[in-house]
Image (cartoon, grey):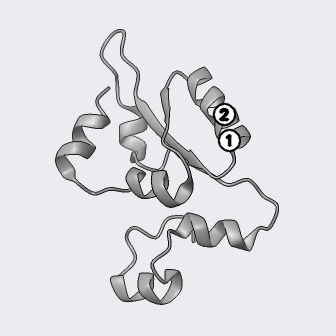
Amino acid sequence: MTNSAFLPPEVQERELKGRLSSEVNADRVPGAKLVKAFNQLPMQGLTAPVPAGGRRVVFISSDHADASAAVASLTENLGFAPIEVGRIAEGGRLIQARNALVFQNLIKF
């Protein structure tokens, strides 16, 4: 499981026990440096035209600063505007916030 946002609540509780799927996956691959990025936008949002001079925002979260910086650099090279939001437990939760007003406004930058 890499993104549990659309799983039924009872499955989320049973499988995740209040944790993010990113945290659970990080535990499954000891020694790996997990980075959460690009998952807040559907494919249509990632590929949609951006107004001249603008860049689409991609939020990045990781418990490893070096891995987060590497993904932020890759994101920038791809033409996006990376915003690092901290560790998975905090920033990862912010990335998957479902406040429609905030979510819709953030993806238009």
Q: Residue at x 43, y 81 (%)?
A: 12
- Taking the spot 47% from the left edge, 51% from the top edge, the residue there is 91
- Residue in the picture at 61% in, 73% down: 24
- In the image, which is nearer the foreground, mark 2 or mark 1? 1
Q: What label does residue 69 carry, if any?
A: 2
Q: Position of residue 92 (x, y in %)?
A: 48, 55
Q: Nearer the viewer, residue 9 or 68?
A: 68
Disc 2 packing (10 Å; few <14; some 14–19; many ≥20): some
Q: Tell me where residue 53 sits by quadrant.
A: top left
Q: Is residue 20 toward the left or the right of residue 69 in the image?
A: left
Q: Position of residue 100 (x, y in %)?
A: 20, 51
Image side of residue 70 versus residue 60, left or right? right
* Residue situated in front as seen by the camera: 42 or 100: 100
Q: CA distance from mark 2 to mark 1?
A: 6 Å
The three-letter code of the residue at mark 1 reads Ala
**In the picture, which quadrant includes the N terminus?**
bottom right
**Disc 2, SS:** helix
Amino acid carrying mark 2 in the image = Ala
In this rendering, the answer to whether 36 lies above or below 106 is below
- Residue 14 has which mark? none
Identity of the residue furthest to the top in this view: 53
Q: Are marks 2 and 1 in contact (CB under 8 Å)?
A: yes
Q: Is residue 99 left or right of residue 17?
A: left
Give the image location of residue 86, x and y in percent.
Answer: 53, 45
At mark 1, the secondary structure is helix
- Is 65 situated above or below 97? above
Q: Which residue is mark 1?
A: 65
The C terminus lies in which quarter of the figure?
top left
Q: Is residue 20 above or below residue 100?
A: below
The residue under the point 47% across, 56% down is: 90
Residue 77: x and y, percent?
Answer: 61, 21
